[in-house]
């Protein structure tokens, strides 16, 4: 049933911005020199909600050419119903990947609009159980020299962030020296590594033991995240104290169900800008709740910090260098970590509490 008196979604639009990195970046399996931000606006009831994802420029066309027509005219106060309608409408486009990222951005915009119509912060609208979202500093790219790596990680540690992550696996012979530089720079701060699927199963087992010598606590995607058997092998046979994590490339609930059912990880990851948005992320969190499994949120900190407060079995959020930089450039009202390494939403600002800096973004617009 629809309420004829309820405000509706009047208009949805999207823009794509390609923003250069501040230095060449690489991980175990990929190199890049720019990041694309897809910014969605949803208007209704005299308010504007915003959402975003990090995807190819074609995602903006998916929003404008398909998803806008699905949600325009629907109730603005029922974002989950619009999310379900979008999932149904894209059957022949293919849900995983680019389409899921486009849905994510629209869903986030609809939730932001919903919260603004209620005049409450998003953390309240999604049902917070925490007052903030703990973070870990993330970057440490394999393209960095040891001095740059040490300086970045030490900066997070000195700011009070109690855990930091670096990329590994591109040039394995160099990693012991990089790990030593990182450990010397951060002292007792927790150290995480991310291989981005660079290893074979046996290589990953070998490197897990070596990482443990540096008191590494978190090994992300030691093998491809599609290799559930390999992840389970690492989880079962890797050194005690090194948690195996994966899930950032999950685009639908079935993916997360299979990963959890396989016992593939010690901590599941999910990205609110990829998995289908806030409506989907809350359902991924419920899968974790049913198994008493922790969930770690991947990137997009200004959205993830808000949604993380509603995740019961929340562990932390990846405070990723590229996204921190871009979101600080793109929006007014961004959250900064407290001295204890927690992002705490501003309860005095409705919705996400963000306002786009469109004039600053315009030079980077491509679609």
Image (cartoon, rainbow, N blue to C red):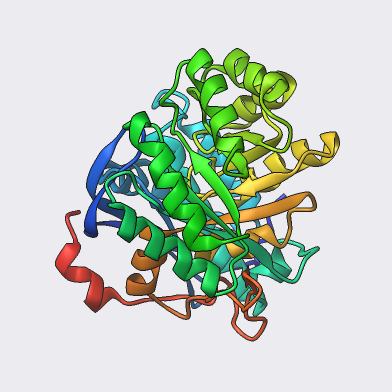
- Choose between 79 and 143: the one closer to the eye: 143
- For residue 195, which quarter of the picture? top left
Horizontal and vertical percent for residue 241?
72, 38
Choose top left, top right, bottom left or bottom right for residue 294: top right
Q: From the viewer's side, name the closer residue of 265 and 217.
A: 217
Q: How many marks?
A: 0
Q: Is residue 32 visible?
A: yes
Name which residue lies at 32% across and 77% down. Answer: 357
- The spot of residue 76 in percent (x, y) is 58, 62
Q: Is residue 261 left or right of residue 252?
A: right
Out of 73 and 271, give the one closest to the viewer: 271
Q: Is residue 343 above or below residue 249?
A: below
Residue at 58%, 42% in the rendered image: 270
Q: Measuring 63% from the left and 60% from the top, which residue is drawn there?
A: 188
Residue 117 rendering spot, x and y as whole percentages: 61, 74
Q: Nearer the viewer, residue 103 or 22?
A: 22
Q: Is residue 271 in view from this perspective?
A: no
User: What residue lies at 45% left-to-right and 27% top-to-bottom?
Assistant: 197
Height in image: 78 above or below 207?
below
């Amino acid at each position: 049933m629809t309420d004829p008196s309820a405000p509706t979604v009047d208009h949805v639009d999207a823009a794509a911005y390609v923003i250069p990195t501040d230095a060449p970046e690489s991980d175990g399996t990929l190199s890049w020199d720019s990041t694309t931000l897809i910014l969605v606006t949803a208007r209704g009831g005299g308010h504007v909600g915003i959402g975003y994802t990090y995807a190819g420029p074609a995602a903006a066309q998916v929003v404008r050419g398909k998803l806008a027509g699905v949600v325009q005219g629907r109730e603005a106060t029922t974002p989950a119903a619009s999310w379900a309608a979008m999932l149904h409408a894209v059957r022949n486009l293919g849900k995983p990947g680019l389409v899921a990222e486009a849905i994510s951005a629209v869903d986030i915009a609809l939730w932001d609009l919903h919260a603004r119509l209620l005049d409450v912060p998003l953390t309240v609208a999604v049902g917070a159980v925490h007052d903030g979202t703990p973070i870990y500093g993330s970057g440490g790219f394999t393209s960095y020299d040891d001095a740059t790596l040490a300086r970045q990680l030490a900066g997070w540690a000195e700011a009070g962030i109690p855990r930091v992550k670096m990329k590994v696996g591109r040039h394995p012979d160099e990693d012991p020296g990089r790990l030593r530089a990182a450990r010397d720079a951060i002292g007792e701060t927790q150290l995480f590594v991310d291989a981005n699927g660079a290893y074979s199963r046996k290589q990953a087992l070998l490197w897990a033991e070596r990482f443990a010598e540096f008191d590494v606590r978190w090994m992300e995607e030691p093998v491809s995240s599609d290799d559930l058997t390999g992840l389970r092998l690492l989880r079962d046979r890797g050194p005690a104290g090194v948690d195996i994590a994966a899930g950032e490339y999950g685009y639908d609930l079935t993916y997360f169900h299979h990963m959890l059912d396989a016992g593939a990880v010690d901590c599941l990851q999910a990205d609110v800008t990829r998995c289908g948005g806030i409506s989907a992320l809350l359902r991924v969190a419920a899968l974790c709740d049913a198994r008493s499994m922790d969930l770690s949120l991947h990137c997009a900190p200004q959205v993830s910090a808000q949604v993380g407060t509603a995740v019961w079995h929340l562990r932390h959020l990846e405070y990723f260098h590229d996204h921190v930089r871009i979101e600080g450039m793109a929006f007014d009202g961004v959250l900064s970590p407290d001295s204890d390494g927690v992002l705490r939403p501003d309860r005095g600002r409705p919705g996400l509490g963000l306002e786009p800096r469109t004039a600053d973004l315009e030079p980077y617009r491509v679609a």
